Image (spheres, rainbow, N blue to C red):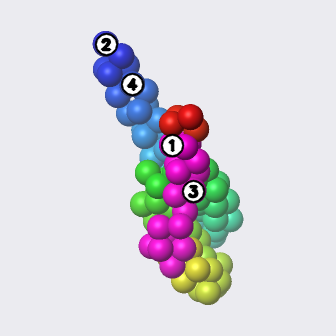
Amino acid sequence: MSKVSSEAISQSAEDELQHVITCIQFANDECDYGEGLEFGLNLFLYGSSKLHSRVMNLLPLAYKLLRRSLYTQIITDHISSGRSNLIEDLNQIEKNK
């Protein structure tokens, strides 16, 4: 029962996340590029590697639309290097205490 409940919660969160991303796409169409930038940064700063694919869809596009291509390279290099799993590593250390 707990697994079913956990999966339902996970699916609900995924649906909500997809809804926000859809709204960001509409904002991009209206030249409001800051929405994707802000949400992408929030997802990145949350620190979960599970969100990296979303971050890599949002931030490079936002940086491109804002003509900040250097930041696209920085975020891409940072995520591909694997250094952004610090939060998950710290959580694992806490669990093992």
Q: Amino acid at mark 3?
A: Leu
Q: Which residues are magenta?
A: 77-93
**Direction from residue 44 to residue 14 in the image, left or right:** left
Q: Earlier in the sequence, mark 2 or mark 4?
A: 2
Asked whether the residues under the numbered discs 3 and 2 touch, taking CB atoms below 8 Å apart as contact, a structural biologist would say no
Which numbered mark, 3 or 1, is in the foreground of this view?
1
Which numbered mark, 1 or 4, is in the foreground of this view?
1
Q: Earlier in the sequence, mark 1 or mark 2?
A: 2
Q: Amino acid at mark 1?
A: Gln
Residue that badge 2 annotates: 1
Q: Residues within 10 Å of mark 1 (few under 14, many from 20)?
A: few
Instruction: Give the residue drawn at x 39%, y 25%.
Output: 6
Q: Amino acid at mark 2?
A: Met
Residue 35, given in percent of the width and then of the height, sits at 65, 59
Q: Is residue 24 visible?
A: no
Mark identifier at residue 92: 1
Disc 4 is placed on an element classified as: helix
31 and 74: which one is in front?
A: 74
Magenta stretch prevailing secondary structure: helix
Disc 2 is placed on an element classified as: loop
